[in-house]
Amino acid sequence: MSEQTRPQLVYIIDDDEAVRDSIGMLLDSADLAYCSFAGADEFLADYDGSQRGCLVLDIRMPGMTGLELQNRLAEIGSSLPIIFITGHGDVPMAVEAMRNGAFDFLRKPVDESSFIDRIHTALDQESGDWRQRLDRDQNRERIESLTEREREVFRLVAEGLANKVIASDLGISERTVEVHRSQVMKKLDARTLAQLVRIHLQDE
């Protein structure tokens, strides 16, 4: 299954089976798909970078802790939002988790309505991040399809230079600049100068 069609899942990671079952039943009642893991190592063994959704992560577990998993996922470039849950957490742990980019930090037992709301918000955030990442990847592929001259024209147009100035800088005719500019717009699927500039900024 490609990343584009991979569904969002809520990944429950908790060493307490009763907690995993309880959260799973709650997610079932809200029609949210999920997958459960008894520990961080078990989740990492299944992780391949294409997962979409969010994590509901216990902060205290045998072996690798929730905070250690958070750090490990950051190291390998994961953008999955993390909602920490714990019955033993304290303020310093909460501060560390949030400083390291956690989406939220909740105490057990969680308020069911609030918990589901936070899950939906986390999934919405992940969806937006994923679409931005997909756009960047598509733009990068399109830029790679440009010829060397088209890339030069693309860069100068995106920097705001007029065709006449670009022609002088590159030692080509203004008409040639117009042809290359048209090809650049077509290959990058950009209909306006603003879109072209946005693609250029994303590629920097």
Image: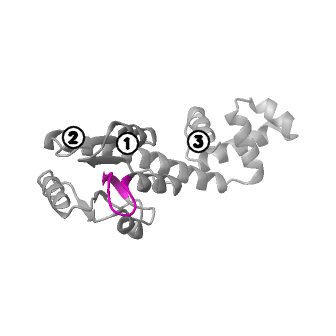
Q: CA distance from mark 3 to mark 1?
A: 35 Å
Q: Which mark is residue 93?
A: 1
Q: Secondary structure at mark 2?
A: helix
Contact between marks 2 and 1 (CB within 8 A): the answer is no
Q: CA distance from mark 2 to mark 1?
A: 23 Å
Q: Position of residue 88 (x, y in %)?
A: 26, 46
Q: Is residue 91 left or right of residue 175?
A: left
- Magenta residues, start to end: 52-66
Residue that mark 2 sits on: 117
Q: Quadrant location of residue 118?
A: top left
Please count the marks in the image.
Answer: 3
Residue that mark 3 sits on: 202
Q: Position of residue 51 (x, y in %)?
A: 38, 60
- Judge depth for marks 2 and 1 and give the one in front: 1
Q: CA distance from mark 3 to mark 2?
A: 31 Å
Contact between marks 3 and 1 (CB within 8 A): the answer is no
Q: Is residue 78 left or right of residue 162?
A: left
